[in-house]
Amino acid sequence: MSKTIDMRRSVYELVSEYPELQDIMAELGFTEIKKPAVLHSVGKLMTIPRGAKMKNIHMDKVIAVLMEHGFTLSGEMPAEAKDEAPKTPIADATEETPVSRTEQLKAYLRRLGEGESLESVRADFVEKFQDVDASEIMQAEQELMREGTPPEEVQKLCDVHSALFHGTTREEQIANAEKEVMASVQRAKELAAQKDYGSKNERMAELAAVPGHPLHTLTRENEVLSGWLTEAKARLDAHEELGELFSRIRELSVHYAKKGDLLYPLLKVNYEISGPSDVMWTVDDEIRDELAEISKIDVHDAAWEKRLRA
């Protein structure tokens, strides 16, 4: 029976059809293919020609070895793979484009879907994306939504990138993530000034500084909420009752409602950016419901405290 390799298919698809290909590729120098996490993430995005270019392995050698093992080849080789292999290994690169970062962010979510642990994915994410921009995360979420990924699945990406926004609770992480969005806007404003061109992000930063404007109000509320959460954590660490502070924290439902009424519809309807809206609506509801359930518990024991800290 003929064994045909279509060069346009992903490495993951080819190995799934021809398991022996994994050892063959590893001997050629594609050693990462033996790691299940890599095969089930990057492998779903990578073709053999692209991988050869990245690993500085000439396609002539790859083709010869594949044919020696009885494979026939089909599919035109991508143009970038026809070029001479790079003189410097990919590991020496100092920059990644937003597009490649978006694909990798999507790969992290797919790794979770394949059953890899959250902590493992999160650790890998933090190592490679310490300087990730919030807008790139939004872009990745948006692309996943366009591909038909359910919002509850995209929400898992929040759990991964929350490791970048320091905080021990979901509320803290979301508040800090929203701060990072504003910081991202400010960075875009400074970049626009350097390149001397107009930017919508610059206008957003200006509006966020106007008292009474929704962006200004939401930013200030984020700051106040972060302060309450910090105080709540200190009280819990000291084994003190939260008292009325817990009631104040529950007022975040009003903050979430404002976002839901003022920002999400505009993003989704006016700009066709549905990812952040659909995902954050789900997260906001989850936090509101959990706080409501916790408020019904009369006994504030260790189990109650653990649930609150989560």
Image: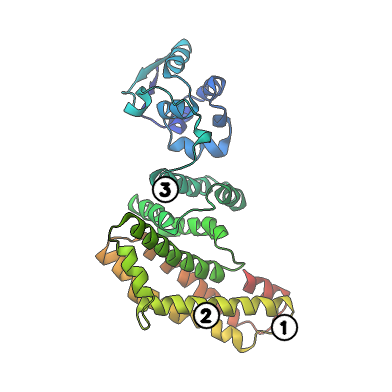
Could you tell me residue 237's position as x and y percent? Answer: 72, 75
Q: Which mark is residue 224?
A: 2
Viewer-nearest of discs 2 and 3: 2
Visual colour scheme: rainbow
What residue sits right under mark 1 in the picture?
Answer: 240
Nearer to me, 165 or 1: 165
The answer to whether residue 162 is left or right of residue 140 is: right
What residue sits right under mark 3 in the picture?
Answer: 102
> What whole-number distance in Å separates the C-alpha atoms at marks 1 and 2?
21 Å
Looking at the image, residue 277 lies above or below residue 145: below
The answer to whether residue 123 is left or right of residue 254 is: right
Looking at the image, residue 285 lies above or below residue 114: below
In contact (CB < 8 Å): disc 1 and disc 2: no
Nearer to me, 259 or 230: 230
As drawn, which residue projects farthest toward the left?
Answer: 270
Identify which amino acid the numbered label 2 is placed on: Val
Q: Residues within 10 Å of mark 1 (few under 14, many from 20)?
A: few
Nearer to me, 66 or 49: 49
Q: Earlier in the sequence, mark 2 or mark 3?
A: 3
Could you tell me residue 236's position as x and y percent? Answer: 69, 77
Whether residue 253 appears in this view of the structure is yes
Residue at point 49% right, 79% down? 252
Viewer-nearest of discs 1 and 2: 2
Residue at point 61% right, 48% down? 120
